[in-house]
Amino acid sequence: AQTVTQSQPEMSVQDAETVTLSCTYDTSENNYYLFWYKQPPSRQMILVIRQEAYKQQNATENRFSVNFQKAAKSFSLKISDSQLGDTAMYFCAFMKRNSGNTPLVFGKGTRLSVIA
Amino acid sequence: SQTIHQWPATLVQPVGSPLSLECTVEGTSNPNLYWYRQAAGRGLQLLFYSVGIGQISSEVPQNLSASRPQDRQFILSSKKLLLSDSGFYLCAGQGGFSYEQYFGPGTRLTVT
């Protein structure tokens, strides 16, 4: 079974600064996907960024980027130029690459507060 | 792109009463559908998933059941709610050639 660990329950960052959220995972699979989801106070889960394990290049979406280290099973999220609207819970998630059903396995989340 | 609808948004029910939460999907056909539950201050736990009409798999044995009467409809039910059923319930869909899961707005259930 796969597990996802987020070791930072809470973090804070000054606006316009950069912050990195950590995520490690455990799997025996070789083909999989990794995701970061954001859950603001509205509790809507929003997909922030995704990474295919077979791709060596780190994914980037505007101010969000990841550092994917496959051998170390590490998948951290970097938020640059943090904004007040980035305040939210952030969840790291793992999904096997499969032709059929593919549930997500989530970490317990990191609560990020952006401070003015 | 697909859109996931859920209702109701909030629900307060007494212990022992029945439950029905509905999820519908727009923008894709034959999606994989999922029910997750999020307890306060915790991550998401997969409850049920479905790869097609009438096909339901349960991840965690409990007081809940799920059904998929139509391709883009997924229902979470209970005959008798327990206090421990309180939580935030999220429906997610995964469709077409996309491997990404998109979530509905969720239902906050409080059992009193």
Image: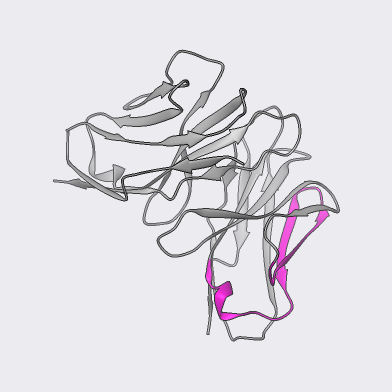
Q: Which residues are magenta?
A: B62-87
Q: Is residue B96 left or right of residue A57?
A: right
The N terminus of chain B is located in which quarter? top right
Q: Is residue A56 left or right of residue A10?
A: right
Instruction: Say which of B21 and B25 sits in front.
Output: B21
Instruction: Say which of A91 and A116 sits in front.
Output: A91
In this rendering, the answer to whether A100 lies above or below A51 is: below
Q: Position of residue B64 (x, y in %)?
A: 70, 69
Seen at 79% across and 53% down, the residue is B56
Query: How are the colours assigned in the image?
Result: one colour
Q: Is residue A23 left or right of residue B23?
A: left
Seen at 25% across and 29% down, the residue is A80
* Residue at far top of view: A56
In this rendering, the answer to whether A112 lies above or below A72 is: below
Q: Position of residue A114 (x, y in %)?
A: 21, 45
Q: Residue B65 colored magenta?
A: yes
* Residue at far right of view: B54
Instruction: Say which of A42 and B100 sits in front.
Output: B100
